[in-house]
Amino acid sequence: MTQDILSDRDLNVIFREAHSFTGWQDMPVSEITIRAMYDLLRLGPTSLNCSPARFVIVKSKDAKKKLAHCVKAAGKELVTAAPFSVIVGLDANFYEKQDDLFAHYPSAKRLFAENKALAQEEAFRSSSIQGGYLIIAARALGLDCCLIPQIDQDKVNEAYFKDTSCRVNFICSMGYGDAAGMTAHDYRLSFDEACEIV
């Protein structure tokens, strides 16, 4: 059976013509779009379907100001100007939901619960992967993205995840990008520079 593949136009939207935006059009993003973004990203694979990522959608004016206090330098303006930002967090105790998420392998919960180092490693790896799905889902729905540099992880954790088993992985601002002043893509490593077929 042949699999359908995305069109060139689709690939352009998600990868080839997508940019990191620092300017935004004055267009609100609906809650319907934000929920649709999550409904897409949650279907991407993670190890044993562990799904450790937790997402805080920072959309209101007050919430943006609060988040701006948790990032450094130019990141402050990026957060306050964007229609919304997503704090991509990870739940260190993600395995508590493992029985529901991976029901056909009853030992999965115990595997992580009894090996905290493995759980910590998997929480970071799979939440990072889910953060990548977030960006792809956002672009597929017509949104643009900007990763926020220089976040103060301690401040984010204190402000958003205090007294929980969650902590921040990274932050991504989103909206409908303003292409004014946009430059060409920076250089990317070629296949031969980054890949090896063995």
Image: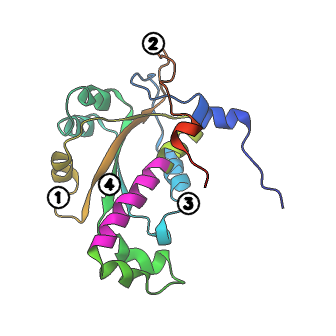
What is the x, y in percent for residue 146?
40, 33
Q: Is residue 85 above or below residue 81?
A: below
Where disc 3 sits, the SS reads loop
Sequence-first tag of 4 and 3: 3
Q: The magenta stretch spans which residues?
A: 117-132
Instruction: Kindly identify the amino acid type of the residue bearing the numbered disc 2.
Output: Gly
What is the x, y in percent for residue 62?
23, 37
Q: Is residue 27 above or below residue 132?
A: above
Q: Nearer the viewer, residue 82 or 149?
A: 149
Per the picture, the main secondary structure of the magenta-coloured stretch is helix
Instruction: Kindly identify the amino acid type of the residue bearing the numbered disc 3.
Output: Leu
Q: Disc 4 marks which residue?
A: 89
Sequence-first tag of 2 and 4: 4
Sequence-first tag of 2 and 1: 1
Distance from disc 1 to disc 3, alpha carbons, whole Å, reads 28 Å
Where disc 1 sits, the SS reads loop
Q: Disc 3 marks which residue?
A: 43
Q: Disc 2 marks which residue?
A: 181
**Picture residue at 30% right of the left edge, 78% below the top:** 115
The number of discs equals 4
Where disc 4 sits, the SS reads strand
Q: Disc 1 marks which residue?
A: 162
